[in-house]
Amino acid sequence: MIASVLPTYNRTAFGFVKGEGSWLTATDGSRYLDLGAGIAVNALGHANPDLVAALTEQAGKLWHVSNLYQIPEQQRLADALVNATFADTVFFTNSGTEALELAVKMARKYWYERGEADRFEIVTLEGAFHGRSTAAIAASGAEKMVKGFGPLMPGFRQVKWGDAAALKAATGPQTAAVLVEPIQGEGGIRALADAELRALRALCDETGALLILDEVQCGMGRTGRLFAHEWAGIAPDIMMVAKGIGGGFPLGAVLATERAASGMIGGTHGSTYGGNPLACAVGARVVEIVTEPGFLAEVNRKAALFRQGLEGLVAAHPQVFEAVRGQGLMLGLKCIPAPVEVVKAAYGEHLLTVPAADNVLRLLPALNIADADLAEALARLDRAATALEADAA
Ligand SMILES: *Cc1c(COP(=O)(O)O)cnc(C)c1O
């Protein structure tokens, strides 16, 4: 008999009832240290008092009205994002997948309005993850996501990871946009080097293709800058944001330049819930906190500390860990065994981590995690690795 919750996830036997900072309390009362943060969502930890206040204050005033009306909280959040980024305009969604949908529509409409309706192709990279809608799986192209769900939405072309010549060959007068994650999350904390991002920006400028960056996972302070592309000193034309921006409340956004967004006039896109008062009250507080002076410097300080510890783990457990990768608090440990085995061993130490492709274990702690919790996480990872070595012996 099928489970009452559609069984598309391979879930653990345990679940949680309460959270505080980087700690979760399970149904059996035991505590877990959370280095997954709901897959980079709980950017400011669980039950953050500032976010609880923002949400409950708004909950007592107004939950939902409709985008037919002015929404002051949405306006405030859009202004904050425009002030802090390359963007001139913002559309709010409830998820990263919905942000992908609009990013694709926006790029295609841009060329349509220029009289080039057949310039619709979107170039993406192998290993990409942009969500689970029919467009998003077509954008990824990965067999495990697309198999059985055809026919796929046409107009996406995947290029092999790390093949600059293939990327250049794939991008031409038929290309509406190139869509990449500055650091692939699900793909295994695989970063495009700053030089590669700059070359990609130049390629887009040469060909006219729009540059869409998916910063759903790597954005909102995760890498130690507000958005990951800032490290490379470039700016996209369109950017997808979600996960961390809501701090746990469902919220996503598409940020764009005036030029890239120029086709999206009245009636061309919409969302019932997108940008509703509850989501935007929380999102505005998240953006306020992450852009406070000193916040990102702290992320970078913690990241350096943690990374140093992880390098020590790699040196101490060469049969389990191969290398550390990533930036800021978006870190990965390349594993020798399958990363799910390491995740399970870490569960045994009551530590939550997340597996990814390319044999990588993802570590995505809250951006404000305490130094002591990072030290505790390293100790637990060390014990998990020791347990795996004992099993293998
Ligand atoms: C999670 C993720 C998405 C999809 O976001 P949802 O909120 O799950 O729809 C898209 N792109 C990237 C890079 C992601 O990590």
Image: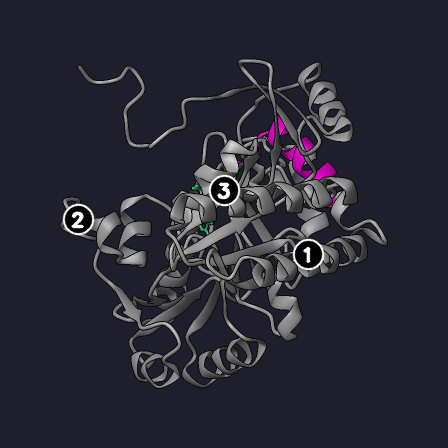
Give the foreground label among 3 and 2: 3
**Element under disc 3:** helix
Q: Which of the pair 236/190 is nearer the observer?
A: 190
Is residue 126 placed above or below 105 in the rendered structure? below
Could you tell whether 114 is left or right of 117 in the image? right
Q: Which mark is residue 147?
A: 2
Give the x, y percent position of residue 66: 53, 27
Give the x, y percent position of residue 157: 27, 68
Q: Earlier in the sequence, mark 2 or mark 1?
A: 2
Magenta residues: mostly which secondary structure? helix
Q: Tell me where the magenta segment starts and ends, as one range.
A: 274-287
Could you tell whether 311 is left or right of 130 in the image? right
Q: Residue at x 37, y 72 (%)?
A: 161
Graded by Cα atoms within 10 Å as few (under 14), some (14 to 19) or many (20 or more), the crowding at tag 1 reads: some
Give the x, y percent position of residue 172: 33, 81
Residue at mark 2 to residue at mark 1: CA–CA distance: 40 Å
Residue 304 within the magenta-colored segment of the rendering: no
Tell me the amino acid under the disc marked 3.
Ala
Tell me the amino acid under the disc marked 1.
Gly
Give the foreground label among 3 and 1: 3
Q: Which mark is residue 309?
A: 1
Ligand 1 within 8 Å, label 2 CB? no
Graded by Cα atoms within 10 Å as few (under 14), some (14 to 19) or many (20 or more), the crowding at tag 2 reads: few
Residue at mark 3 to residue at mark 2: CA–CA distance: 36 Å
For the residues bearing labels 2 and 1, Cβ distance under 8 angstroms = no
Graded by Cα atoms within 10 Å as few (under 14), some (14 to 19) or many (20 or more), the crowding at tag 3 reads: some
**Element under disc 2:** loop
**Quadrant for the N terminus in the image:** top left
Q: Quadrant of residue 175?
A: bottom left
Q: Residue at x 46, y 59 (%)?
A: 319
